[in-house]
Image (cartoon, helix red, strand yellow):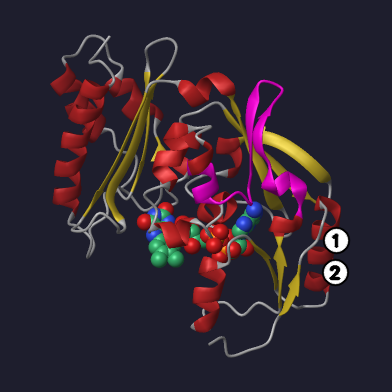
Amino acid sequence: VIGFDFEYYKPGSIEEAVRTFAHLDAEGRNPFYYGGGTEIITMARMNNVVPGAVIDLKGIPECRALGHGDGRLIIGAGATLAEIHESGLFPLLGRAGGRVADHSVQVKVTLGGNLAGTIVYREASLPLLVADCEAVVAGAGGLRVVPFQDVFGGRLNLPRGDFLVQVNIARESTCLPGFHAKKTRLEKIGYPVLAAVMVRDRQGRYRAAFSGLCSSPFRSVELEAALNDARLEPIRRIDLAIASLPAPVLDDTEASAGYRLFVLRNTLEEALDALGGVA
Ligand SMILES: Cc1cc2nc3c(=O)[nH]c(=O)nc-3n(C[C@H](O)[C@H](O)[C@H](O)COP(=O)(O)OP(=O)(O)OC[C@H]3O[C@@H](n4cnc5c(N)ncnc54)[C@H](O)[C@@H]3O)c2cc1C
């Protein structure tokens, strides 16, 4: 039960959504953009968030896009993880989203909600971080297109009142040889001890992104330089990659830091094997 009343808006255009947010915000109504609602509803039940109004983005056609245009794959922020998976358009993203909670949750959780939510794992970000990906963001100044990594530093980070409309990905990035693994503590469904995505780009270089390892998902230049260091044997590359982690390793009830590092080492070995060893 949610112990307070709030208003529900479902705008049919980007402009209307931005205007509605600005209007409600100016009135002090604490509006929230609303994707699948899974997190907003859970947190509202516990009074961890108290929105005066929610603005459902799923009535906006651009937010529901899922298809190709101008040589790029366009995915609306309101597309659900299940829709993305079932479309088969970006297999690696389908696989990453297909391991978030269970299917009954995946049919509700949206790409935008996964990237912007407070649950730290944001696993759908991993394939986007290793792709040539842009974010389309709406705000008071209109629409802007920026590199995905400019708005995602472990979490979607937008000025108040802005929202993610879409991501678009170079088509060739969606069909690179790819590896995905999610390791959990016990059951198949659960938060990641480690989720990893690795691809090999057209130049044969590895790109890798991780969730569950540090406090938020990341891709690291130093770690990739280690994985791509042609002077080193695979095992040494992995040692160096592990030594180059950009932040402390999580140590919590899911797993100790030591265990996460053990899982990381095995997963990197698996990934290099799966993608054809070292160049
Ligand atoms: C049972 C369960 C298990 C989960 N397990 C995992 C897991 O293992 N791994 C994992 O990565 N995640 C996990 N999650 C988190 C999940 O993937 C989503 O992050 C989350 O629940 C929110 O998605 P939603 O679309 O329902 O967003 P909502 O609840 O609608 O919104 C969440 C937040 O995102 C903001 N938001 C939504 N869309 C946009 C947008 N387009 N632009 C800007 N801001 C936006 C909202 O304002 C709100 O602050 C789990 C969630 C549940 C409920």
Residue labelled with disc 2: 23
The response on whether ligand 1 sits within 8 Å of label 1 is no
Foreground pick, 232 / 94: 94
| Side of 105 relative to 26 (left or right) | left
How far apart are the alpha carbons under marks 2 and 1?
6 Å
| Side of 116 relative to 248 (left or right) | right
Q: Residue 59 falls in which quadrant of the image? A: bottom right
Let me know if residue 121 appears in the view: no
Foreground pick, 268 / 1: 1
Crowding around mark 2 (Cα neighbors within 10 Å: few <14, some 14 to 19, many 20+) is few
Give the image location of residue 74, x and y in percent: 65, 34
Query: Marks 2 and 1: CB-CB under 8 Å?
Result: yes
Let me know if residue 244 appears in the view: yes
Query: Going 17% across and 35% down the picture, which residue do you hit?
Result: 265
> Is residue 251 shown in magenta?
no
Vertical side of 3 occupied by 274: above or below: above
Give the image location of residue 16, x and y in percent: 85, 58
Vertical side of 83 occupied by 219: above or below: above
> Is residue 84 shown in magenta?
yes
Give the image location of residue 64, x and y in percent: 68, 47
Crowding around mark 1 (Cα neighbors within 10 Å: few <14, some 14 to 19, many 20+) is some
Residue labelled with disc 1: 19
Q: Which mark is residue 247?
A: none
Looking at numbered disc 1 in the image, what kind of residue is underneath it?
Answer: Arg
| Side of 98 relative to 60 (left or right) | left
What is the span of residues highlighted in magenta in the rendered image? 60-85
Q: Residue 145 falls in which quadrant of the image? A: top right
Query: Going 23% across and 61% down the picture, which residue do you hit?
Result: 254
